Image: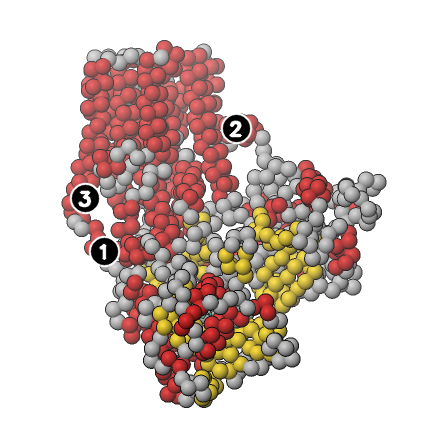
Amino acid sequence: MADNPYMNSGQTSNNPYSTNFEMASNPFSSSMEMVNSTGTIGNARPGASIISGSSDNSGTSEDSSATTQRMRNSISAKYCTKSVEETANDFGTDIHDGLSSQQEITYRRSIYGKNELTREEEEWMIIKFLSSFYSDPMIMLLIASALISFYMGNIDDGISITSAIVIVVTVGFVQEYRSEKSLEALNQLVPEMAHLTRNGATETVLASTLVPGDLIHFAVGDRIPADVRLTEAVHLTIDESNLTGETRPVTKFTAPITALNSPISKRNNIALMGTLVRDGHGTGIVIGTSRQTAFGSVFDMMSSIEKPKTPLQNAMDKLGKELSAFSFAVIGVIGLIGLAQGRSWLDVFQVSVSLAVAAIPEGLPIIVAVTLALGVLRMAKQKAIVKRLPSVETLGSVNVICSDKTGTLTQNHMTVSKLWTPDMITEHMDIIQYKDYSSQLTNPLQTLLLTGCFCNNAKYSVEKEKFEGNPTDIALIECLNSFGLSDVRSSRQRVNELPFNSSRKYMAISVDDGDRRNTVTFIKGAVEKILGMSKTYVAKNGEIRPLSDKSRKLIYDMADKLAEDGLRVLAMAKSSSGFDTTPSNSQFCGLVGMNDPPRPCVRESIASLMRGGVHVIMITGDSETTALNIANKIGMPVTDPDRCVLSGDRIDAMSEEALSEAIQYVSVFARTTPEHKLSIVRALQMRGDIVAMTGDGVNDAPALKLADIGIAMGQNGTDVAKEAADMVLTDDDFSTILNAIQEGKGIFSNIQNFLCFQLSTSVAALTLVALATIFNLPNPLNAMQILWINIIMDGPPAQSLGVEPVDPEVMQKPPRSRSDKILTLVVIKRVLQSAAFIIFGTMFVYIREMSDSITRRDTTMTFTCFVLFDMFNALSCRSQTKSTFELGMSNKMFNAAVGGSIIGQLCAIYVPFFQSIFQTEALSLKDWFVLILLASSVWIADEVRKYNAHKHSGNLTGYSTWV
Ligand SMILES: Nc1ncnc2c1ncn2[C@@H]1O[C@H](COP(=O)(O)OP(=O)(O)OP(=O)(O)O)[C@@H](O)[C@H]1O
Ligand SMILES: [Ca+2]
């Protein structure tokens, strides 16, 4: 330990990492090699509890004890016993200003790497590729048949089959590789952030940039980005359940722990990476990043637990197995008949094996995975990040969306537009932004405005040249200007604060009264809360009067009047003393009405959702009047306000059953707290609804978890909400939900489309060979040709059907029922219709050609006929309902895949090398003409089917809406 690897300035020998370097077997030493970065800690998030997770599923008991051991040895064990000063000293950092030397930061980064967790080095590509040759029994059989061909001196066949195997395996491998890459990309969609102080300046940075010694801050709702020794903890409680399994949040302190070898759950002055702040706020020094954290030491074990498959993938696997069993049976029978007819057993074997390879849609699960993953990436571009693949399927089934009002349906940009003080009696004052009202400033107005200023947490950001924080607070500060007032907060010392939250619905701040002997309290919040703690008001003549029932009524009426334009109404009060727990005995100052306009596209989105049978519910903390007005503005159906609007206190008074009964008429929930959301989701689910619910705060998490699709806000949401959610909206915009549902539905119909394509090809190929065998005809397709058809069917053309752009018309279809099968009657009919055309067409060509004697030309014609049929079939499979002419050339991948297949087919016929492999010969232009004409019949027939379906379904908008 001569060299201090940690401090290149090296004044101290007391190296915090020395222990790491002394132990060769230390689990963290591997971190030094960890330079590449493919995943983030996001990979390991979904697990609820590492410890319990390991003992009840994949891990053996040995695993979990090793885990516990590793966590026990983690860096926090050492620093929980040291004081704040010692820790800061060890890390060469300052507990107020953080690290100061850029050189030092760069040095530490070079040693400890990025603060993110990556999986262990993956297998070599080439090994993976080679292993796919022997992992599939069908391929093994093909190899066997090639070997037999060689052995029997059938060199041509041997080479043919060998090249076919290579092509089949390569195509499969490339597809699988792509699927893995796109799945990996999903893990990086939600970046981790951290609030970091370096050199005295605080900013928000990517959590991956943290190095040991950094000073970081976190507040309620945040996720801890590294292992941290706390230097400050204010009401700080942290939920460590995902690491320790303990569900009760732990209260944190800064004092050193005296007990030796305290277990990880008892290290109360340490905040652990990946845990969630439930309350309060704190600051601390980073003592460990990435692999040196307790979370990092168990990361590999967590990421090795295989991700569960989505219901759709499971259904596909099952379908694949059933189809395989069926094909095997058919092929077995065909083989036996063939042998009984005295065909050469090698021929029978080869054709059977190739048929098995072709008829079994082994590419199905991969195509489903790629389609889902690509769809999720597409959604991310449209600002909706889906965190779990199964949610994509659920999206198409959602029939109720519960949305917050502020910030999701509205812009969350507030401006003060009306003011009222009791001396104005029945008049109120309208404020137009940027106009000067200084001349109209009265004493009561000044008191009202200054209350709004003192009772405020908006902060001025020099960098961005504007106020930041709660939009309600910002509006109040910005309004001061219109009256020639300025932000006076710095002139007084803050003594006490009761912060705002959506359950409390008010906030109070005490400051000294100028001469530091007396304290005054400023309060603002919902009208009923403020009136509840007010005793007096200032009348027109300046006289202080007690608040009578009559004057309360006047205030409530006025608040309603202000709210009528959809304004958020805040009441203000002031008291000439401080407060302990809640303020009381205050003087009512007046009301402020704030405008928060609806987001531009919300109206359209709601209309579109309603057309598709999705019910939209607004949930807001604002008053009924405000909510009702906004609801009307954005086109929500509130015909009967008595039934359509339900307030929080009425929810409280209802039983679950009663709520579930009443909820069918409700479109607006007003004056709710986050806790009400849970009852609302439950009541809806009791009715059998599939519910999407939005949320942003810590208290929204339970409802987000319970909802079928929990949706968190990317910009204003807390980490806790994002963690609990299935989907994150990066722009917080309601309309994005519509896009996501549209994509979800689109993905589902794309999967049905390529399934239809694969099944019709497979059914046709099987039937053709079966028919030929039964009628004792020579095989219409040889092994090589069948394998080439398999590549078209399982490869790029099928995959390209999965990325067909979403047709906005899917929104007009009602939500899919959860139990709906993917293989619906309509799909099966499509499969059978197409297969029938392919079989008859190909048989026709075959029989016509072979009427003289079997030549190479005959099989070439049959083979090309089948392939062309398949291409036309792919064309019609692009959509279940829309004509090819409506779709146009919009799917680039489809154009490329089909174009490529046709070029491939041309090569197979005209290039001498391939001619010998496929046993083909050149066709004339006339042949092509005939074949194209014939093969297009499958497409024409489908166009006719689509046309008829359109005519009979009539107006698609007529689907039932709510109730
Ligand atoms: N910063 C604040 N200070 C004091 N009171 C506030 C503040 N913000 C809102 N209020 C009061 O609390 C009420 C409800 O706010 P709440 O936060 O519950 O709603 P929200 O969650 O912002 O809105 P939504 O539920 O529509 O998204 C408002 O009508 C207002 O009277
Ligand atoms: Ca196949």
Give how far apart the Cα atoms at labels 2 and 3 are.
45 Å
Residue on which disc 1 sits: 959
Q: SS class of the residue under badge 1?
A: loop
Give the answer, above or below, for where 299 lies relative to 174.
Answer: below
Image quarter where the N terminus lies is: top right
Circle 1 crowding by C-alpha within 10 Å: few under 14, some 14–19, many from 20: some
Residue that carries the numbered disc 2 in the rendered image:
129
Is 266 in front, or is 588? 588
Q: Position of residue 629 (x, y in %)?
A: 31, 67
The mark nearer the N terminus, 3 or 1, is: 3
Q: Locate residue 453 relative to residue 738 in the image: left or right.
A: right
User: Where does residue 104 sit, x and y in percent of width and height?
Assistant: 72, 43
Q: Identify the residue at image location x=57%, y=58%.
A: 222
Could you give the CA–CA distance between mark 1 and mark 2, rounded to whole angstroms?
50 Å
Q: Earlier in the sequence, mark 1 or mark 2?
A: 2
Q: Position of residue 291 (x, y in %)?
A: 66, 46
Residue ID at (48%, 14%): 151
| 886 to the left or right of 539 | left
Q: Amino acid at mark 3?
A: Ala
Which mark's residue is nearer the viewer, 3 or 1?
A: 1
Please, what is the three-letter code of the amino acid marked with disc 1?
Tyr
User: Where does the C terminus fall, quadrant-wise?
Assistant: bottom left
- Residue ID for mark 3: 949
Answer yes or no: disc 1 within 8 Å of ligand 1: no
Residue 112 picture location, percent across and down? 69, 42
For this view, does 618 lie left or right of residue 500? left
Label 2 secondary element: helix
In three-dimensional space, the C-alpha distance between marks 3 and 1, rounded to whole angstroms, equals: 16 Å
Residue type, label 2:
Phe
The mark found on residue 255 in the picture is none
